[in-house]
Image: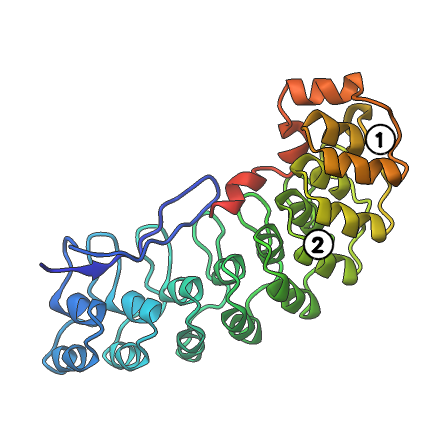
Amino acid sequence: MRTRVLAGCAAGASGLSHVFDYEAAEGGSPLHDAVGFGATAAAAALLAAGAEAGAADATGITPLHLAAGRGMLGAARACLAAGAEVEAADASGATPLHVAAWKGEAAAVRLLLVAGAEAGAATPRGITPLHLAAKHGHLEACRALVDGGAPLAALTDRGATPLHFASMHGRRRVAQLLLSSGSWVDAGDRGGASALHHAAAAGHAGAALACLQAGAAVGAIDGAGATPLHHAALAGSADVVRVLLAAGASASQGPGGATPREIALARGHAEVASILERAGGGGGGTSLAARVLLAIGAGVVACACVGWASLRSV
């Protein structure tokens, strides 16, 4: 059965989700099949016989997309030498560089950049190769992109930077790389949430610590008036709560007058509530403000960073 690697992008709430399953492709060429099967010699023979290097299948995927995603440097070089377009975009706007970054193929990333690929190429949803490499924790691919001039402040349609992606997915080492390379640690997304808000909301203590070590404002307020501590309390992350308190976070009131401890109690996070009480969180029970927040859905706090849950699924 003819098969291929899908590098198509399924648009989610905020962007991109590549699928690399090998299955039958409409409109795919023998060259697609050769590259998809990892047959570099066959691909070279097809190109030498005149196969069209830039041929796209029904979803806009070219052999170069496939070679980049599989780290097949020989096939990628052969396609480029035969005239393949390095900036070819599939139906969702993803270039071969997006694919290489998503798969963590650092050598392919470097090859494409040398061949002239735009390091900051963005899909219609604003997703750049660096967003994808950061989200998946591909440190060396991120390093190659940063060295190649990828914009650290690139924004998705929801205002998220690569640092936001690294933080919300707990990619501590990637976050450290981005921060040491010049990413603004307190940049807010469309909902005013910083990377520290995102790390706290997702329960990633390592990423939170990386942000704090880079000077993140521990008491930063998002669009709903919530601090990272409120997000950590809502998520029930004792580790993040401890990190934030050690960094000087205040356990005082926040959105609607609710304290982080009251939010933790309302969510049933007893350990977190106990930690906050010992830190001076105050209040012997759940305030009306906290109960109202939970009654209308904790999204008042957790989704203050617009679409943060959606971004995590990119």
Q: Residue at x 46, y 68 (%)?
A: 118
The colour style of the image is rainbow
**Residue 226 in sight here:** no
Position above or below: 194 against 55? above
Q: Quadrant of residue 238?
A: top right
- Residue under label 2: 208
Residue type at tag 2: Ala
Q: CA distance from mark 2 to mark 1?
A: 21 Å
Percent of width and height locating residue 185: 72, 57
Left or right of residue 295, residue 75 in this image? left
Q: Which element is circle 1 on?
A: loop
Question: Where in the figure is residue 231, as x and y percent of width and height?
Answer: 70, 39
Q: Mark 1 highlights which residue?
A: 253
Q: Nearer the viewer, residue 245 or 165?
A: 245
- Residue displayed at 66% across by 28% down: 300
* Residue 175 in sight here: yes
**Label 1 crowd bin: few (<14), some (14–19), many (20+), radius 10 Å:** many
Name the image quarter holding residue 43: bottom left
Q: Position of residue 228 (x, y in %)?
A: 74, 43
Q: Secondary structure at mark 2?
A: helix
* Rendered residue at 73%/58% (across/down): 209
* Crowd tier of the residue under label 2, counting other residues whose Cα lies within 10 Å: few below 14, some 14–19, many 20 or above: many
Q: Nearer the viewer, residue 310 or 116?
A: 310
